Amino acid sequence: MFRSGKPFEAPNDAIADDVVAQSKHLKVGDKVTLINHEFTICGIVAHGKGARYFIPLKTAQDIAGAEQRVSMLYVRSKGDIEAARAQILGALPGNDVKSVAEYTTLMTSSNLPELKPFIRTMVLIGMVISFLVVLMNMHTMVMERTREIGILKALGSSRLDIVKLLLGETLVLAVLGGVAGIALSFLVEGILRETTPSLQILITPAWLGGALLLALGGAAAGAIYPALRAASFDPVVALAYE
């Protein structure tokens, strides 16, 4: 779908997608250098076509020295991808046949083998820090509210009531903090989309749910010990606490 301009008319014509056009402030008629050759932007299309720039096939073959040859073929299956793959390999053995889903994963940073251990390590460090921060805050809060806890126990509150009270407060704060963090993530994403349109940021529901669950899990883990300690206070000692 063309946003502006028209298809190729000359060998040195090139088409750009709207993302790179916005980031580089390109418009129809501008000159760009691709593969050490100068091209003229003849059209701008919507992104999502698998590349940022497009040039005529004959021009690409001439530049690559691959006249009368192609390096990639797209085949449309009838719904059974594996059967289509087997048929292609049977007719053209030794070739690399990938589904569109497999091919597109090669273009994403999440497919880098070194990145996944790094992400897992960062998530683990974040959980440890979350646990320690909540633990220290809850411990301080319990110490500051010792008399209040003593009054509650003197009025008949059970240990379970005290634990539920403190854990409930912690989880409410964790939910509010998680929602604020998610909102901040969307705000940063919006800013980056405006300042750097070529940078693709994908925030999926799975990531949002995982982040919220990690926040709640870290907060609950850090609050358990202080809550149990508060529930074990002797009412007389707690009321006399200064």
Image (cartoon, helix red, strand yellow):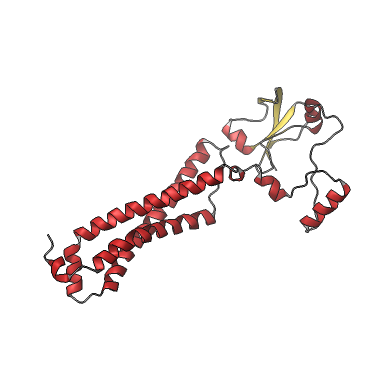
Q: Is residue 34 depicted above or below 207 in this figure?
A: above
Nearer-the-camera pick, 21 or 146? 146
Q: Is residue 209 depicted above or below 106 in this figure?
A: below
Nearer-the-camera pick, 29 or 154? 154
Residue 187 in the image, given as x and y percentages of width and height: 45, 46
User: Which quadrant is the C terminus positioned in?
Assistant: bottom left
Q: Is residue 70 left or right of residue 19?
A: right
Q: Classify residue 47 by image quadrant.
A: top right
Residue 226 in the image, given as x and y percentages of width and height: 28, 61
- Residue at 80% across, 33% down: 57
- Residue at 16% across, 64% down: 147
Residue 120 seen in the figure: yes
- Residue at 86% across, 45% down: 92
- Residue at 51% across, 46% down: 119
Nearer-the-camera pick, 40 or 127? 127
Q: Is residue 95 depicted above or below 37 in this figure?
A: below
Residue 186 seen in the figure: no
Count of numbered circles on the image: 0
Residue 151 in the image, given as x and y percentages of width and height: 17, 70
Q: Classify residue 178 by image quadrant.
A: bottom left
